[in-house]
Amino acid sequence: MLRRRDLLKRGVIGGSAAYLAWRFPSLMPPARAGRLEPFSLPLPIPPVLQPVRRDASGDFYELTMKSGRAQLRDGAATEIWGYDGIWPGPTIRATRGRPTHVRATNLMSRDVNIHNHGHKVPVESDGGPLDVIHPGESRAYVYPNDQNASTYWYHDHTMGNAESIYRGMAGFYLITDPAEDALNLPSGEYDIPLMIQDRTLDGENRLTYGLNEKTIEEGTLGDTLFVNGVAMPHMEVANRKYRFRFLGAANRRTLGLRLGDGDPMIVIGSDGGLLEAPVSLSALPIFNGERWDVVIDFSGYPVGSSVVLHNTRGTELGLSFPPLLPDVMRFDIVRSEPDPSDVPSQLASVERLQPDDAVKTRRFVLEWTDGHWTINGRIYDPARIDAYPVLGTTETWEFENRSDQIHDLHLHLVQFQQLLGPDGQLPPPYRSGWKDTKRILPHIMESIIVPFDGYTGVYVFHCHMLEHAEHMMMGQFEVVGPEGPGASATQPNSSFVCPLPTSTRYG
Ligand SMILES: [Cu+2]
């Protein structure tokens, strides 16, 4: 059988709408009444979760996983799944060094959990894929917050999270600290988290999701961009600086953000903290799981004017055809205000790791093997450890992408830095800070340098294209302390059931 990518290479498909409609009807925008006009709904800001108590040991929160209903456009309300029944879930705000305790209760009819993406946490609170909360049960997670102020996010991480995140199970987790506060960046109501995702609603306003051979290989693409759970919203702003915390939380779609005709976006932070210095960009790629802290200064726009945030990224090598979704959201400059905020030329001190800092180099090959996404030819197996880094040491990890698709490697527990890129060049300044998720472009090798700090134990690393991770581009590393491997907590695996035929498993 001819594969889609063969057809692409031969130019048989060539973007033919007729072919697409026949072969992939789900990719075609359905004809429907009530289709939303861009920028017609206001941007919602997720509520900040309030602690049920505070004491010397930290702040205590309660979160409930349950279904809810949301008005995503005209017509019927949509059933979503969410933390506290909302999409995005409530934002958790934490202060560096002060622990957060979250008691999570699962009121859904399926297993779910919480993984706090980007967090340095003990295994017991990492929320790995098999460490689930069964329906009707509760459990506590403890986050030490012993890490940089930055934008993090929490989401379901069970095997099956491609669907649960698609249906809404993700929220922001922000850490601040006094050093960041002292910079006088835009804050309070001028500090806005923006979760960007693509989704498809059917004629009855239901979120459509289906796993099949195509979506496992290529991922799930939606036909509409949502920001904070609303399709292509607008936001009223003053003519001053705002801080936006962009999160790429799509299942598969990667984005290229452009403001207006290429107006400046000032990047101040990446996944794991502030950059050394602000970087002004006219185009900002954003891949799945990545966060970019960006300041936009609206003082140059007349009150009464608007500027659109566009997506410029459409067709990709190896994908049958993700139609370009050009509209992300619109900013309406509606009032004049003084602006006491600042973007200092020095934001933070970022120690730049050098290749010589690494005590070991490991290579991981990313490819499509016999119907699954694999790392070094192997699918996820919770009984297998792929690497044993030693606590307190630094390693170089090389990712060689032998497939036609982008992958997006995420390591739990750690923050890392990009080393030389595929062209032997240093990463651009905006990608020189701390990261926990790294896109690996097709048919190249890229490397990262990783300090293994914090805790011993078994953690997963995986592609953050959600269907890729679920089928089954995921491995495990065990951070080993002086007592040797196997001495500390592991991800529980008693409930693991491989969703694939056993004949296709690799040893
Ligand atoms: Cu992938």
Image: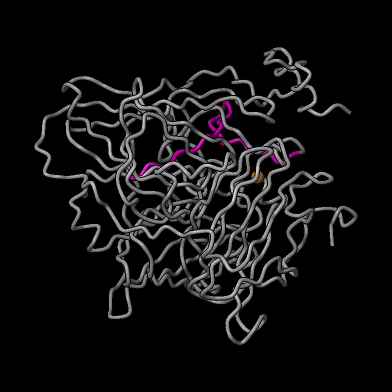
Tell whether 333 sits left or right of 152: left
Tell me the quadrant of ligand 1.
Answer: top right
Q: Is residue 412 above or below residue 14?
A: below
Asked if residue 399 lies in the magenta stretch, the reply is no
Asked whether residue 106 is in view, the answer is no
Image quadrant containing the C terminus: bottom right
Q: In this view, does 338 lie above or below 462?
A: above
Image quadrant containing the N terminus: top right
What percent of the width, then of the height, locates residue 262? 35, 24
Report the front residue among 242 and 409: 409
Report which quarter residue 53 is drawn in.
bottom left
Q: How many labels does the image show?
A: 0
Q: What stretch is highlighted in magenta?
A: 193-212
Q: Residue at x 35, y 20 (%)?
A: 261
Asked whether residue 474 is in view, the answer is yes
Tell whether 40 sits left or right of 373: left
Overall secondary structure of the magenta stretch?
loop
Report which quarter residue 474 is drawn in.
bottom right
What percent of the width, then of the height, locates residue 331? 29, 28
The figure's colour scheme reads one colour
What percent of the width, then of the height, locates residue 432? 43, 49
Report the front residue among 399 and 311: 399
Q: Residue at x 58, y 49 (%)?
A: 164
Q: Residue at x 71, y 12 (%)?
A: 18
Q: In this view, does 312 lie above or below 432?
A: above
Tell whether 139 sits left or right of 179: right
